[in-house]
Image (tube, rainbow, N blue to C red):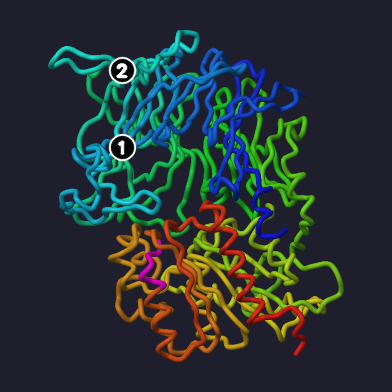
Amino acid sequence: MRARDIETLVSVGRPTIAPDGGFAVFAASRPDITANRAVGQLWRVDLPDGTPRRLTRGTADAAPIVSPDGSRIAFVRGDAKGKGQVFVVDAHGGEPVQATDAPLGIGEFSWSPDGARLAFTARVPEPGRYGIIEGLDSSAEAPRRITGVRWHENGAGYIGDRPSHVFVIDVPDITGEPAYEPAPALQPEGVEPPKKVVVAADAVRLTEGAASHFGAVFSADGAEVITVVDEIEPEHRDLSTPVLAVRVDGGGSRELVSRGARLSVHEVIVADDGTVAVLGDDVGESGVDFVAPPTALWVIEESGPRRVTDPALHDLGEGHLTPLGDDFLVQVRARGRNRLVRVTREGDISEILGGDVDITGHAAAGERIVAALATPESFGELVLVGRGPLTDFGRASRATGIVTPAEVEFSGRDGYPVHGWVAKPAGEGPFPVILQIHGGPYAQYGIHLFDETQVLVDAGYAVVYCNPRGAAGYGLEHGRSIRGAMGTVDFSDVIDFLDAAVASDPALDGARVGVMGGSYGGYLTAWVIAHDHRFAGAIVERGFLDPVSFQGTSDIGSFFGDEYVGVDPDAMKRQSPMAYVGEVRTPTLVIHSELDYRCPLEQATRYYSALKRHGVDAEMLVFPGENHELSRGGQPRHRVQRFEAILDWWARKLPIGDTA
């Protein structure tokens, strides 16, 4: 796979299914270098064995949901200003009709049980901000008064002056006559000329105040909308999130989950019998106990939330919920895979779909289940459980010459098993080796097709990557083992895995090695090169490099570093790559994005400056207009340029033909 082959990486979004199970709809998207954006449309496939067909022809249509009667599909499409709005289209296709007109676009949405209304969330800008006054540039807006412990968010910017609220709106008649642009005409003095009607109904706002609301799900009787509350804290970060049921008739709200329950809720669903269930983490009495979060399925009862699954046995931290009769579908993350399981309300679990798959979404009607997934040979497909694949989007990627990594496990210096993969080019080698380190740290490398690895292998490198202690997918103890001890067993795990991989395969040249990683992977890469000088080069990307300044600059700085490295100055220094930058000898490329608020740009610039001050061969590459998600969701041209810069760096520091 070459850098430009990212255009073959078709991802399949969370599917939706007709109530009678007769068809499924999903969004497929891919990077397009010419358009310099992700492009995609909705697809429909009749079940059980229909041929998928493109249902819409927008630029980036996404997030479809079939109406309760199966006749219509609501989805998100950019409006004339590029803001995401809800549109509604006939389930068989046709011209979509715009349903919402939120100034900053919508967040989440759902159908009412009778299909007559839509509930949605949307950010409400403070008067005078974010283009509300035409011609008023953002640089001329009034200053922002900030009194809370957080104020911005990666990929969004400032958040305090545009809280997200809940709305309901009538669904437009998709068979009605469209609105037309009024022709210019002389109007009587004092009479405003008519304007084109963009949407047929006015949205009714259900929530008020400075707090934001996420998720908008109708209760079974349609009388309430259930939403999660996120309020900016005045003094100390608290990850717990109340859940409210807000009456549609304006009659107030009631609390389903209190802040005292200490749950950080990710998703809310309503079962057919009206039962409310949530996916959430127990954040403890501190409200910020998030390291290796114990994500579980909870059912909301009169006495409060009741935990259904055991997070020590089943990690539900990378998925969502689907009601299935009296049961629920969830995804379980383990050893580089995400499998689909069915959970009863008593907590009994049975596997629905497993093997070498990474489930990314699912939907069900009756006993018919569809799932979106990735595999070692495909970035995204839709399958009908029990029947097999419904799509073959991966054929384009397979044509680029992808390799299937070998899955291996080695014992570290203390006997701890370290699990991961080795990918290498065809032939006998020996090949120069690049150690890749993932972000998170509570995340995992997996079995799915990964462009980062494939591009390096195509260029002639063997790639070694693993899930060290601190990663997800191996239990809570594994994930929490680096709390207050970053740069200890995680460091030894990646080094021991590299050594064992090289020792086990003569095609890997242990005398020619490089190391690279992003986010937490950037942290550990910077740590590695300060403590091990064997590497010909390193790439430190969007790294968490100085816990001290991270506290006051990152959008998660109010709790992330506190929980991982602590607040004691000596402990922070002991785990800080910046504190050890004077030990680095390895040539280092620092990559970062201007709008990265997760690991802010200052982390990179200060680290790069320190490398230069200590005489290290260092370069820095800064991408304009991008945030922390550059490598996964950035502009396609920037993603290609990033790959080109990475390959150029390795060609200079770790050339393929050098067998010294």
Q: Could you say which is closer to the camera, residue 184 or residue 361?
A: 184
Helix, strand or loop at mark 1: strand
Looking at the image, the residue that sits furthest to the right is 428
- Using the rendered view, name the quadrant where residue 413 is placed: bottom right
Q: What amino acid is found at the position of numbered circle 2 in the picture?
A: Pro
Magenta span has 599? yes
Disc assigned to residue 10:
none
Range of residues picked out in magenta: 598-604
Magenta span has 588? no
In space, the residues marked 1 and 2 are separated at their CA atoms by 33 Å
When the figure is inspected, residue 97 is found, relative to residue 431, above or below; the finding is above
At a point 67% along the width and 81% down the height, the residue shown is 654
- Using the rendered view, name the quadrant where residue 95 is placed: top right
Q: Position of 163 compared to 89: left or right?
A: left
Instruction: Decide: few, some or many residues near mark 1? Use Cα within 10 Å; few <14, some 14-19, many ≥20.
Output: many
Disc assigned to residue 184:
2
When the figure is inspected, residue 360 is found, relative to residue 283, above or below; the finding is above
Q: Could you say which is closer to the camera, residue 241 or residue 350?
A: 241
The residue under label 1 is 123
Helix, strand or loop at mark 2: loop
Instruction: Decide: few, some or many residues near mark 2? Use Cα within 10 Å; few <14, some 14-19, many ≥20.
Output: few
- Using the rendered view, name the quadrant where residue 168 is placed: top left
At a point 50% along the width and 63% down the height, the residue shown is 441
The picture places residue 92, in percent across and down from the top left corner, at 62, 16
